[in-house]
Amino acid sequence: MSTTQLLQNYLGGQWHTGTGQGTVLFDPVLGTELVRVDATGLDLKKGFAFARETGGNALRAMTYAQRAAMLAQVVKVLQANRDRYYEIATANSGTVKNDSAVDIDGGIFTLSTYAKLGESLGERKFLIDGEAARLGKDPLFQSQHILVPNRGLALFINAFNFPSWGLWEKAAPALLSGVPVVIKPGTPTAWLTQHMVADVVNAGVLPVGALSVVCGSSAGLLDALTPFDVLSFTGSADTAGVIRSHPLVAQRSVRVNIEADSVNSALLLPGQAAGSESFDLLAKEVAREMTVKSGQKCTAIRRIFVPEALFDDCAQAISARLAKTTVGNPRNESVRMGALVSRSQLHAVQQGLAQLKAHAQVLHDGASHALIDADAAISCCVGPTLLGSRDANQQVFHDTEVFGPVATLLPYKDLNQAYELVRRGEGSLVASIYGNEPAALGAAAVELADSHGRVHVISPDVAALHTGHGNVMPQSLHGGPGRAGGGEELGGLRALGFYHRRSAIQAATTILSGL
Ligand code: NAP
């Protein structure tokens, strides 16, 4: 039996130790045991009721501006403890410093953005939605829509790849809306989430019951939900299906947001020569997207579409960049790409790669990368692999998300075929488009908007300014239709919609103007 530290859960305003053996969390580079998580024996229904009543009442008693100030306090607590978060990320996620920053600083930045946005909502306790509308000839009786904070809790079931950002990008709009949060992190990397929650709870900057954490098994979580709760899930399409069809979620009309997997695209528009600025920008972005966080980003580029005449040049340009990626132990300063998160993820990546390889040629082989300070028999490190096929019609390329440093280069004959191939992904989080003619780029962006939550347009004039294909900015929508889950997160104050109820108040104009 493992004797590593058992992390505590925080629920019902108290710390609880699970009564089971727990699940061990590992260092994915060294293979050593780190900590354990366990939620056995927690009274979830009682804890959820406490969050709704004690946490929810306290949050709803505050104005938006007060809650925005509260988020700013959370930012200060997290900033004061940043070094420790980086240590945990290195040990438990196996990420190099830049990749840990995407998660840790990305989460803190998102929180501070919502703290600023919240200030603009002022000393109000509910929001006015649009103009009042007359209900008849007489203007005396009208309808005014308002948005009031949900009277339930927000349960977040998160994926393993963003233990920090995944928590705060959801918690920021929820807490700003006045809705208490219960977070259930992805088990393999739950340590960072648990540690951040512990720091914030112990600092006393949130009302008791506003933020709770349950680590370990998800058993019983959905059964503890009631009709006014909301559930936000991030993870695989398979688990999303289980959650959507859970009987209580369906019977109680629990509002659900799903962020699932997605086979995102990069598209080089016609008319770009090999070695042109747009061509180079595509090669650079693809190599970056494949290697940041070892490709474990839901937004990472998985399919690259280029005019067929540029297939070979593109294969060479991307491969040349990938060849420079040093892979291994993130503690070694020379390493640029760390590990996958666990042995089971390593096996999943190997399986997905084998599946794609059966239909594609290997343009750059991840196996050609010698691991630095890491033992291939123990660590979860893997080099980046670029695949390619001249037959872009094979559905396997459009269906298969390998959650690692793997992407496939595919040629197209004309733009209509390119759009058709991109849409074979059946809905994605993001597509990026590369070219140098504003009208053509604008038209392509509108064309792909129906099947993507975000379209990232990279032209030479924004080469040094753009925020990156895969970087999710709090100002922009995150989520995509179809396979991507159909959810919507962030997008500035739009995110607050999920945590509010809209109601139409039909009343005399004097009453409405008093609102
Ligand atoms: P996962 O296996 O679906 O797990 C996601 C979460 O669901 C974890 O917290 C997991 O808990 C929990 N879970 C598992 N079975 C459950 C059940 N029956 N009921 C309730 N909860 C359950 O996904 P993952 O492997 O952690 O994450 C990788 C996937 O997430 C990738 O496919 C990636 O594309 C996707 N992702 C999407 C986004 C996005 O924003 N669209 C962001 C990041 C990742 P345990 O960990 O304890 O099993």
Image: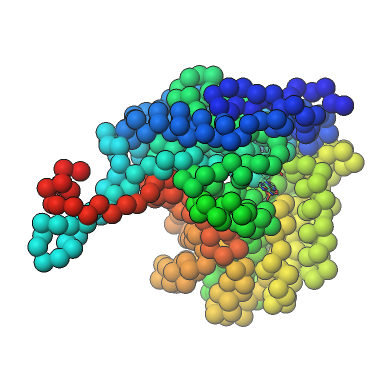
Nearest the camera: 389 or 4? 4
Residue 391, horizontal then vertical, whole percent: 72, 77
Quarter of the image for residue 390 reads bottom right
Instruction: Relative to 126, say whether 40 is above or below.
Output: above
Instruction: Relative to 448, say whether 484 is above or below.
Output: above
Q: Residue at x 57, y 59 (%)?
A: 485
Residue 432, horizontal then vertical, whole percent: 54, 61
Q: Is residue 515 visible?
A: yes
Nearest the camera: 277 or 167? 167
Q: Residue at x 50, y 54 (%)?
A: 253
Nearest the camera: 442 or 486? 486
Q: Is 105 left or right of 97, judged from the image as shown?
A: left
Q: Is residue 315 visible?
A: no
Q: Is 54 left or right of 485, judged from the image as shown?
A: left
Q: Is 168 left or right of 397, judged from the image as shown?
A: left
Quarter of the image for residue 217 reads top right
Q: Residue at x 77, y 48 (%)?
A: 345
Residue 14, horizontal then vertical, whole percent: 58, 22
Quarter of the figure with the C terminus: top left
Quarter of the figure with the N terminus: top right
Furthest residue in direction right, as rendered: 377
